Image (tube, rainbow, N blue to C red):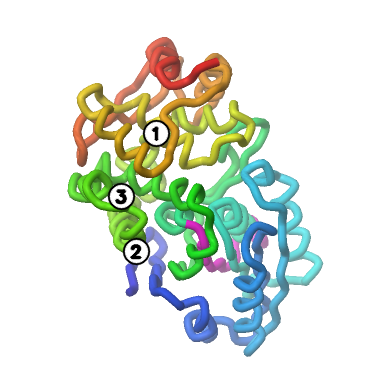
Amino acid sequence: MIIPVKTRDGGYDIIMERGSLSWVGELIGKDGEGKLSLIVTDDGVPAQYAETVAEACRANGRAEILTIPQGEENKTMESLTAILRKLVELCATRKDRVIAVGGGVVGDMTGLAAALYMRGIDWINIPTTVLSQVDSSVGGKTAIDFAGVKNVVGAFYPPKTVIIDHDTLSTLPKRQVSNGLAEALKMSLTSDEKLFALFENEDPFAHLDEICERAIRIKKAVVEEDECESGLRRVLNFGHTIGHGIELACGGTLLHGECVAIGMVALCADRIRPRLLSVLDKLGLPHEAACDPDEVLALCAHDKKAEDGAVMTVLCRDPGSFQFYLMDFEKLRRRIMTVVRG
C-alpha cells in the first residue's frame, strides 16, 4: 500500500506493507546509486533491522551504521552532534543521505540532522515502533529536546520516503505497543468517531494494521492542509500540552504516549471522560501521574503554543470533534491538578 503525502515542495510516499524491510533494497535502491547512506539507529532496536538496510544500500553504494543510546533522555544536542560529526567524518556530500531505522526519537533526530547538514540532504524514515508508525512518520516534524524543553529546537523537513513494516512490531513489549496506540486514540477522539468506536468495542491489539493506516490518513489530511502548524495542525497537539509537561516532570518514568493519555484525560469533556478512561484501561494506559503540578505548569509555560500568559489547547467534547481554546495559566493549572498528584 502506498499513501502519498503532498508538501509545499512536492511530496513523499508512505509505503506500508508487512515484510517490506526484507526487500527494502527494491524500495530505495534506485535512488542510492553511488551514494553514501548513513543509517542511524539506537541500541534498543534489533540490530538486524539496520544491518538489513545497510546491506541493501551497499548493493550500489556505501553504507555506515551509527548506533546512538535509546530513550527520550538522549534526544539531545549531543546525539544530534554525533550524527552530524559522523557525516563530516564520512565526507558526506549533498548527494548522500541519512536513513532512520527506529522509533520517534531516532526519526526526529535523523531528520533534523538531514535538514542541517549542508543546508539539507535527503533522508528516509523507517519507523519500527507503533508510536513512530502512526504519528511521527507523517508530517516532517524534526526536533530535539533542549534546555529542559521538549522539541524546542527543530525544523519542518519532510523525508524523501517512509517505509513501514508492521512485522517490526513483533519485537515490541506490550507497553510500547500501548504507548503508540495512545497517539492513534488521540486522533480518533478529535477526528474519527468510528475509529474511536473500534477502540471502545474491539480489541485494538488485534487491529494494529487498520489502526495504523487510519491514523496515518487522518494525519495526512491535516498536514496537507496545514504543513507548518499555523492553524488546523494544532489539533494534533490534543493531550500534548499537558502531556509534554508531565513527560519532562516525571523524568522519563512515563513514556510519551502514556503522558499524552493523561493529557487527554485533563482536556476532554466530563461527558466523554468515563468512555476515555475505559479505553485507557483496555490499553493499559495511565489516568494520572505522580509529579509536581507546579513544575508541569512551568513546563507548559515554555510550550511552543504559549503566548501572553495563556496556551492554545485542544479540547474534545465528543468523539470525532474538537475545539481550539486559548487557556490562561490558572485554568490550565486547575486542569493539571485533576490528573497530577504531587
Q: Where is residue 204 in the image (x, y as percent from the top left)?
A: 32, 53
Which residue occupies 62% across, 67% down?
98
Q: In which quarter of the image is the C terminus?
A: top right
Q: Mark 1 points at which residue?
A: 239
- N-terminal of the pair, mark 2 or mark 3, is 2
**Residue 139 covered by magenta stretch:** no
- N-terminal of the pair, mark 2 or mark 1, is 2
Magenta region: 115-129
Q: Where is residue 324 in the image (x, y as percent from the top left)?
A: 29, 29
Residue 153, relative to residue 70: is it above or below?
Answer: above
Q: How crowded is mark 3: few (under 14 residues within 10 Å), some or many (20 or more)?
A: many
**Residue 126 covered by magenta stretch:** yes
Label 3: which secondary element? helix
Q: Where is residue 150 in the image (x, y as percent from the top left)?
A: 57, 36
Label 1: which secondary element? loop
Camera-nearest label, 2 or 1: 2
User: Three-letter amino acid code at disc 3?
Assistant: Val
Q: Mark 2 points at which residue?
A: 209
Q: Where is residue 229 in the image (x, y as percent from the top left)?
A: 39, 42
Q: Mark 3 points at which residue?
A: 222
Which residue occupies 54% across, 22% down?
290
Label 2: which secondary element? helix
User: Which sits in the foreground, 332 or 264?
Assistant: 264
Residue 26, relative to residue 200: is it above or below?
Answer: below
Residue 178, relative to residue 247: is it above or below?
Answer: below
Q: Distance between the residues labelled 2 and 3?
A: 20 Å
User: Three-letter amino acid code at disc 2?
Assistant: Asp
